[in-house]
Amino acid sequence: MTDRVLAPFGRRRCAVVANEATGGYRLISALDEGGPPPRAGQFYMLAGAGWGGTGGRPYLPRAFSVAEAEAGADGVRLDFLCEAVGPGTGVLAALAVGDALHLTGPLGRPFSTPCELAPGAAGAILVGGGIGIAPLAILRRALAERGVPQRVLLGFRDRAHSGGLDLFRCSEVRTASEDGHTGHQGYVTDLLAVLLEGDDADSAAVYACGPAAMLEAVRELCAARDVPAELAMETPMACGFGSCFGCAVPLAGGGYMRLCVDGPVVRAEEIETAMVAGSGH
């Protein structure tokens, strides 16, 4: 288990350097001149220009997994995948080049390596759903740099709620969609179930991020086949460093964890269920 982050880095003002459409989402890039590079699975608390404007909303920063990070001479370029679904994400999706993006991070527990999850795991299966594909993009690159073979399974509700495929610069990507606009018509967990019927059940670790129902299906599939898995989960977060207890998740052995400091990446066997109130993408 990777040690949790105990305290956040200070809030920093970064400049937006790009905001591009990718399907139904926006890919927002900012240059972080003062922070360290994140690890795959970590997140940032984001607030944009115009925060708390008319009517005071949005009130609080929003938690976003980082989709990609590239260190350079001027700092770390951070990419975030965003879907405008409310006051906060609406402000972030509308940011223009040169606007201020205020962030705190990187925060939280990152993904483990396959051999850390299980000594016999030689490869990885990445399972993403909707906007939850974001942290799997940076994970895929990190695994590729270590020479770890991986298979990528991505699922979407429909064409309007899909995008970000350009973040996955590899040929081994299989897709699923509920409306049939791309790949297999059905759920991405259908594709996972097929893989786990073969040799992958004995040689791979599963990494997943997406809607709560998808994560619960992944958890159950992996538990039934004794396959190690990590889930990058989402719950409402107000602070990002464990003080508000708004992101409590029930543990399998009783009690709770605070997802912002004990997660957001959790071992599938650690939790009672991925169906946590307020979660989803």
Image (tube, rainbow, N blue to C red):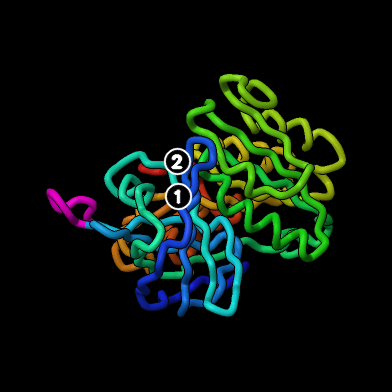
98 in the magenta segment:
no
Say whether marks 1 and 2 touch (CB < 8 Å): yes
Q: In the rendered image, is residue 94 in sight? A: yes
Tell me: residue 158, above or below residue 143: above
Q: x, y (%) of residue 63? A: 40, 57
Viewer-proximal residue among 3 and 73: 73
User: Is residue 55 located in the magenta-colored stretch of the structure?
Assistant: yes
Give the secondary structure at mark 2.
Answer: loop
Residue highlighted by disc 1: 234
Residue appearing at x 53%, y 36% in the figure:
23
Residues shaded magenta: 52-59
Q: Position of residue 61 (x, y in %)?
A: 31, 59
Q: Amino acid at mark 2?
A: His
Q: Which residue is mark 2?
A: 281
Instruction: Tell me: residue 115, above or below residue 7.
Output: above
Query: Which of the 4 image quarters holds residue 201?
Result: top right
In the picture, which quadrant includes the N terminus?
bottom right
Question: Where residue 209 sits: x, y (%)?
Answer: 56, 46
Left or right, residue 212 beside residue 102? right
Q: Left or right of 15: which side holds 223?
A: right
Q: Which element is circle 1 on?
A: loop
Q: Residue at x 49, y 43 (%)?
A: 21
Q: How many numbered discs sit on the rendered protein?
A: 2
